[in-house]
Amino acid sequence: MKVKRPLIALGIVILLVVVIGGFFGASTFLNTGDKALKRISPAEEPYLAKYNLLQIGMTYDQVIAIMGKPDREALGLRPTWRVNDSPFNQISAYFENEKLFKVRWMHIGSFILEK
């Protein structure tokens, strides 16, 4: 039985997507905490200074006063700031009962910082 070339090409593309996605996923999720801090570039340091000022329990207005206007917002529950205008490098603040309960900085392919 003859296998059609388009199916083989599709299989190769899917395999490449899975391998590349796995690489970036592993790089991102394996570099947390102190490992993440070592991967922060000089261009990201101003964002790190702001991130370090954020404290769990802050109000939305307090977070905005530190971070500035968000680049994206989901109903006031999760404002997000792009780091150096990159869609792959973002800081998100999560609110519940009008208080900050989690902050996540995810630089896809590099690190995750979370508090």
Image: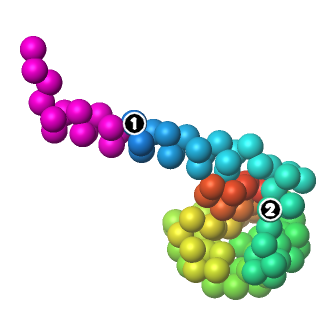
Label annotation for residue 101: none
SS for callout 2: loop
Residue named by callout 2: 39
Q: In the figure, is residue 80 to the left or right of 20?
A: right
Considering depth in this image, is 111 or 14 the residue closer to the camera? 14
- On the question of residue 33 being in view, the answer is yes
Q: Which of marks 2 and 1 is in front?
A: 1
Say if the magenta span includes residue 13: yes
Considering depth in this image, is 106 or 100 the residue closer to the camera? 106
Query: Considering only vertical position in the picture, is 19 above or below 100?
Result: above
Q: Position of residue 66 (x, y in %)?
A: 79, 81
Give the amino acid type for the residue marked by disc 2 in the picture: Arg
Q: In the figure, is residue 19 to the left or right of 97?
A: left
Q: Say which residue appears at 68% left-offset and 67% top-offset.
A: 91
Residue named by callout 1: 15
Q: Say which residue appears at 67% left-offset and 50% top-offset.
A: 28
| Total residue callouts | 2
Q: Earlier in the sequence, mark 2 or mark 1?
A: 1
Q: In the figure, is residue 43 to the left or right of 4?
A: right
Say if the magenta span includes residue 88: no
Which region shows up in magenta?
Answer: 1-14
- On the question of residue 50 being in view, the answer is no
Give the amino acid type for the residue marked by disc 1 in the picture: Leu
Q: Dividing the picture into quarters, in which one does residue 55 lie?
A: bottom right
Q: Say which residue appears at 25% left-offset and 39% top-offset.
A: 10
Query: Considering only vertical position in the picture, is 54 above or below 7?
Result: below
Picture quarter with the N terminus: top left
SS for callout 1: helix
Q: Say which residue appears at 14% left-offset and 24% top-offset.
A: 3
Q: Position of residue 78 (x, y in %)?
A: 61, 64
User: Label 2 vs label 1: CA separation?
Assistant: 28 Å
Bin the neighbour count of mark 1 within 10 Å (Cα to Cα): few under 14, some 14-19, many 20 and up.
Answer: few
